[in-house]
Amino acid sequence: MKIILNLFFVVLCLLTSHAFYLPGLAPNIYCRKPIADSKCKTKVDVFVNRLDSVESVLPYEYAYFDFCTITDEPSPEGNLGQVLFGERIRPSPYKFNFLKDVDCQFVCKKKFTSTDENEQKFLKRLMKGMTLNYQQHWIIDNMPVTLCYSNAESKEFCSRGFPIGCYVTKRGQSREACNIHDGKNDTFYIFNHLDFEITYHSGEGQSREACNIHDGKNDTFYIFNHLDFEITYHSGEGESWGEAFGEDGGRIVAAKVQVSSLNSATCTHGAGPVMFHSTVKDIEIPFTYSVKFKKNNDIRWVSRWDYILKSLPQTRIQWFSIFNSLVIVLLLSGMVAMVLLRTLCRDIARYHEHMYTINEDDMQEEFGWKLVHGDVFRPPRYGLLLSVLIGNGIQIAIMSLITLIFACLGFLSPARRGALMTCNYSIVFSCRKTYLIYSGAIICYVLLGTAAGYTSARLYKLFGGEDRKKNVMMTALACPGVIFGIFFILNIILWANGSSAAIPFTTFIALLALWFCVSTPLVFLGAFHGFRSPAPRHPVRVNHIPRQIPEQTMYTKPIPGVLMGGVLPFGCIFIQLFFILNSIW
């Protein structure tokens, strides 16, 4: 009867529950023209983000390559995670209205002359970006603009970025995404024309080639200066949220782009590509785009990320690597358990065998595990350092666990940029505005300073340590200080190279404030409770005189032992670390 009542209570809770969107993830509604008493938008904003490459560790801001920019609009406010990951979201001059198709819209023209050193610097950056295959990342309605094409299995693959252009090497080789026919050697092709196709979902009931350049020359750059946008939307006709405008409005569910190179500001049919060699000094590049809206009622707003996530190739490999790691861990654990079990069983059998055969002279003789039972809990030589490292390790482990829990609950959605580092809410006050930023891994790490201080203090007290102040200060400053020092040096290198990954000075001040004003006091608080708590008692008494350790062989010394003992655990986790770091960066 009790089970039936519990099931009835669960069903009743499900029937009375309500779903809600996470803050910042509510859908935007667009309409053809402004409508009274409705919250729909007419203007579709296009934002640009950083440019990165798999062949380089340095991301750059959009303006670094001297593309068409706009300065009279403010940039959207980001969170701490976006700043730390080097994301720099800026407004773009690409403007269009909902359900208004555009055939060829001129944006700007960039001119590079041999007499201007600044223009030559930007031209060299452009060549370097195409040589290293830097990818642009644009955002429409909080969704990445994707470049889709078919792979060898005739399945659509969508990338969350698209290249600046294409470089045909001296051997006539180019990127697959460029799809250049008969490319000229040692030539750059810039993709300067964009075609936008926007698909929408109605309330009512084939990918193209990325770039098609013919007669391409070797050692030539082809810049993608024309973009064709395809924007898919979900119409509001027949929907409760679309009663005010019907089929004249909707929600954007996809944004795709096709890149091409056109040496014409009017997108003249048959115009050749914008190409130049590495030795060029003078060149003009027009930038244009086209937009096409497409209605699709089969795609719901809540599932609009599915076509992007399905294109990620890591999913199948991830499950295989997890299974592989689990098998290795189980085998190693089983081997160690069997060795220990057999050793203990053999020792116990020997004890029972000699229990009735020993004489008074053999009463003090010990063998097996009893040889070390009086030295197992002897304090280590560097107990202070060990307690500090374990305390900080507990802090990192709990932070990772909480982050994984938030990820499983969906708080780390790809639509929430920077959510990995910032996933919960916190309020930050400044002299101008009150910012609502998301606090995740960093804030979790800072707030878990209590756990680090408590664990370190308990262990240090267990080891019989007396310099408590040194223990607390090292727990609060040693490991974070080393990490912050490395981070500071790397940031100087990134700043010297003009990378967008270099964080500003104000962010450094914010991180220092979190460290010294929040984390350090919490470490002191945890250590205070740790030292007040009674030290745990050992199950056996520790001998006053340490047992003499025999001369060690080469492989039992500390450094070889650390290397040999760490190889197998690292072999179990390095595949997982590869996918984790690859997903982050």
Image (tube, rainbow, N blue to C red):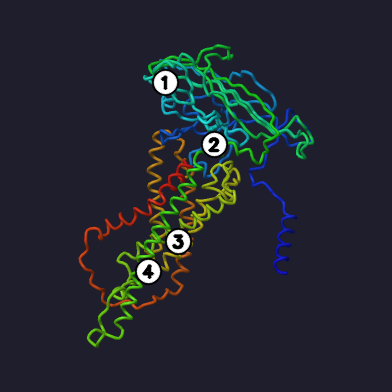
- Which numbered disc, 4 or 3, marks the residue closer to the eye? 4
- Which numbered disc, 4 or 1, marks the residue closer to the eye? 4
Q: Is residue 225 above or below residue 336?
A: above
- Which numbered disc, 3 or 1, marks the residue closer to the eye? 1
The residue that mark 1 highlights is 168
**Which residue does the image show at 38% across and 56% down from the upper left?**
478
Query: How far across and down, in percent of the image, does residue 234 sit?
Result: 70, 34
Q: Helix, strand or loop at disc 2?
A: loop
Q: Is residue 198 above or below residue 321?
A: above
Q: Residue furthest left?
A: 551
Give the CA distance from mark 4 to mark 3: 34 Å
Residue 534 visible to an observer of this rendering: yes
Give the mark, 1 or 2, whose residue is nearer the N terminus: 1
Give the mark, 2 or 4, whose residue is nearer the N terminus: 2
The residue that mark 4 highlights is 341
Q: Helix, strand or loop at disc 3?
A: helix
Give the CA distance from mark 4 to mark 1: 64 Å
Q: Residues within 10 Å of mark 3 (few under 14, many from 20)?
A: many
Q: Is residue 186 above or below residue 562?
A: above
**Which residue does the image show at 70% across and 60% down from the upper left?**
10
